[in-house]
Amino acid sequence: MTDLYNKYLDMINRQLTAYCPGTGGVLAESMAYSLHAGGKRIRPVLTLAFCQACGGDLQKALPFACALEMIHTYSLIYDDLPCMDNDDLRRGKPTCHVVYGEALALMAGAGLNAEAFSISSDPSLDMPDRLKREALTVLAGASGKDGIVGGQVLDLENNGKTKLSETQVATIHHKKTGAMLKAAALLGCIAADAPEEKRTMACCFAEKIGLAFQIRDDILDVVGDTGVLGKTTGKDKVEKKITFVDLLGIDKAQRLVEEYTAEAKQALACFSHPEFLVYMADMLCSRQK
């Protein structure tokens, strides 16, 4: 399974370099700096994996996978800004605003977001217009008020709160993390023109691993190592954010990660060859970075 993961990574990284080589001025350079800083590429890998699980052509899914990674990267640039999470380390490197300044970091994020939609609406994409429209709708939904933007606002409002329920924390996670993972799975299904049953179960899988992923992130913020994670740990406590670790403790939070992971794997029953997706779910459940 590691070989297949690396195959997907290679496809994604090569295409991202083609889309955003980092030449042509400081804006292009700053966009490429964050986009090519590394990372697990979980979202685009999921897009390719679901396309393949639905019997589709990976080359048709690849533009959507790259577009999603651009949107994810822009959201990280913004998350790290002093007016947001105020972080100076991302993927083991100084954050975009530390290297290029806040103003250019804002423009780099805006540029990546726009480029994502340009790629996804390219007339040369070899698929029916109805599928392109569906993909654009999914990208826009995951990117806006019901997705990462709305999630980030809720996350900011969490700062300094003395009390939040488990449902309220889960809502933040659904929007800030889950929406993009759900989009990743759904885009792979759209590229393969998969039937509604598979799209529904792909979304179910993504919602469950989205919660598992973010709860695991909360745990790693407490017990993880900055050198391994590639980002500053202990930020939630400093910013007085209420997380699942605060609500449940580390052991119960990890058990919840395992429960959501098991539910995610159960959602894969309608796929003929879900082995790689099962592997991904287990990998994210026990990840150290």
Image (spheres, grey):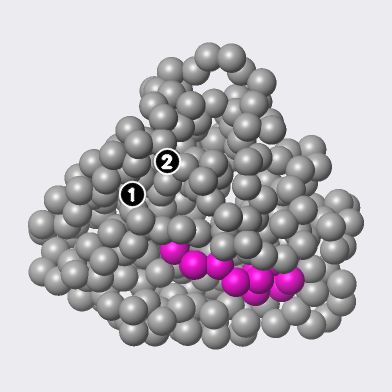
Q: Identify the residue position indicated by label 1 in the image.
A: 209
Q: Does the magenta stretch include residue 190?
A: no
Does residue 117 show up? no
Does residue 223 show up? yes
On the image, which quarter does residue 230 sit in? bottom right
State the residue in front, 84 or 253: 253
What's under tag 2, amino acid-wise?
Ile
Q: Which residue is drawn at 23% across and 41% down?
A: 259
Q: Which residue is drawn at 71% across and 40% down?
A: 85
State the residue in front, 261 or 274: 261
On the image, which quarter does residue 162 sit in? top right
Residue 243 place in picture, x, y as percent: 50, 30
Q: Identify the residue position indicated by label 2 in the image.
A: 215
**Left or right: where 126 falls relative to 79:** left
Quadrant occupied by the N terminus = bottom left
- Return the disc, 2 or 1, that comes first in the chain's sequence: 1
Part of the protein shown in magenta: 31-43
Circle 2: element type: helix
Residue 167 place in picture, x, y as percent: 39, 23
What's under tag 1, amino acid-wise?
Ile
